[in-house]
Amino acid sequence: MILNRRQFLLLTAAFAAGCETAKNPGATAAARERVVNAGPASDYAAEGVYGRFHDQGFFVVRRDGKLFALSAFCTHRKCRLTAKTDRSFFCPCHGSMFDPGGRVVKGPARRDLPVFPVFTNENGQLLVKISPI
């Protein structure tokens, strides 16, 4: 049987995914979702962008009295974003820009940044529910 390029790539991707799951059966479920303890919710009382969890893939943002988390990865090619002093976000790889709410202002990105749910537990800790993008 001779495979065309598309069939070969699909078969290769399926094989690689199967190998990864065999090595670590919990990897697929773990990659879907995780909850990160971002510390005391009181640490985020002031309006602004908090980049403390930038390396873990999100920014905590307080805007107009509301607290939320935004992905720290550009929706174009998943490059790590930088927060600007005006509370917008910039992608150093290809120049995409996002407003303080995570909406695309300048491409090449076409999709807004994912917003991750946040909630406070009974101990006053801010928990961020991260889903892969």
Image (tube, rainbow, N blue to C red):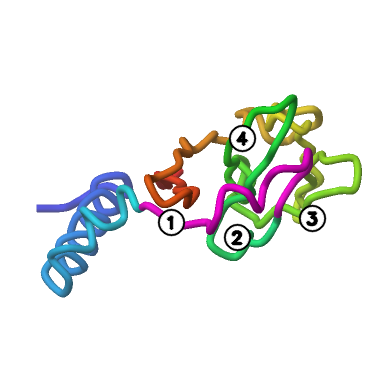
Judged from the image, the secondary structure of the residue bearing numbered disc 4 is strand
Q: Residues within 10 Å of mark 3 (few under 14, many from 20)?
A: few
Give the CA separation, mark 1 to mark 4.
15 Å
Secondary element under disc 3, as helix, strand or loop, is: loop
The part of the image, by quadrant, that contains residue 40 is bottom right
Residue for badge 4:
67
Which of the 4 image quadrants contains residue 109?
Answer: top right
Magenta part of the chain: 35-50
- Say which label, 4 or 3, has the lower sequence index: 4
Disc 2 vs disc 3: Cβ atoms closer than 8 Å?
A: no
Compared with 97, 78 (above or below) is below
Look at mark 1 in the image and give the residue it sits on.
Answer: 36
Instruction: Write the residue at 75% across / 46% down.
Output: 49
Q: Is residue 116 left or right of residue 76?
A: left
Q: Is residue 28 left or right of residue 68?
A: left
CB within 8 Å, label 2 to label 1: yes
Sequence-wise first label, 2 or 3:
2
Query: In terms of sequence position, does the residue under pointer 3 or pointer 1 come before the other?
Result: 1
Q: Under tag 2, what secondary structure?
A: loop
Say how many tags the image has. Answer: 4
Which residue is identified by label 2?
Answer: 53
The kind of residue tagged 2 is Phe
